[in-house]
Amino acid sequence: MEELVLCAASAYEKKFYLSEEFFGLPQSVKDELKIMCVLFTEDVGGILELFFNEDGELEFRTSFDEGDYLYDDIGSVLKVKELQRLKRELLESLELYYKVMRNEWNG
């Protein structure tokens, strides 16, 4: 199975995206993801994606437009590590949710 994007936020478009496969998550979890992603892009700029890799592990991916000289590359790495530490329980719960749902999706 390929990677599946959970959510993403863009400092450029000022938008948050949640994959429709995850609309069934509790509203509090969706709100926490939105706040986490939007604050990340407000802080360091660029685009943040949270996605599940082929093994069902949740990963962070950051990117930025080529001409974006305000993007904080070092800050983005530090912020990802901070989020992985502070939101560990949430992230682990999402991985478990994904693994259970993946089995249901694949029937």
Image (cartoon, helix red, strand yellow):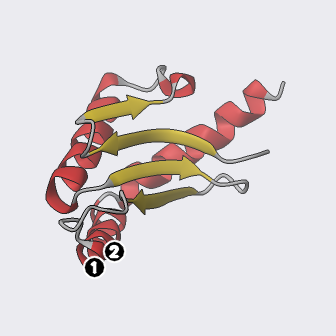
Q: Amino acid at mark 1?
A: Ile
* Position in image of residue 56 (x %, y %): 66, 52
Q: Report whether 59 appears left or right of 70.
A: right
Q: Return the mark for residue 74.
A: 1
Residue at 44% of width from left, 39% of height from top? 7
Q: Amino acid at mark 2?
A: Val
Residue tagged 2:
77
* Position in image of residue 90 (x %, y %): 38, 49
Circles 2 and 1 in contact, beta carbons < 8 Å: yes
Q: Mark 1, residues whose alpha carbon is within 10 Å: few (<14), some, or many (≥20)? A: few
* Position in image of residue 104 (x %, y %): 74, 26
Question: Can you tell which quarter of the image residue 34 is in?
Answer: top left
Residue at 26% of width from left, 68% of height from top? 79
**For the view shown, which residue lies furthest in the right direction?**
107
Residue at 76% of width from left, 34% of height from top? 103
Q: Return the mark for residue 2.
A: none
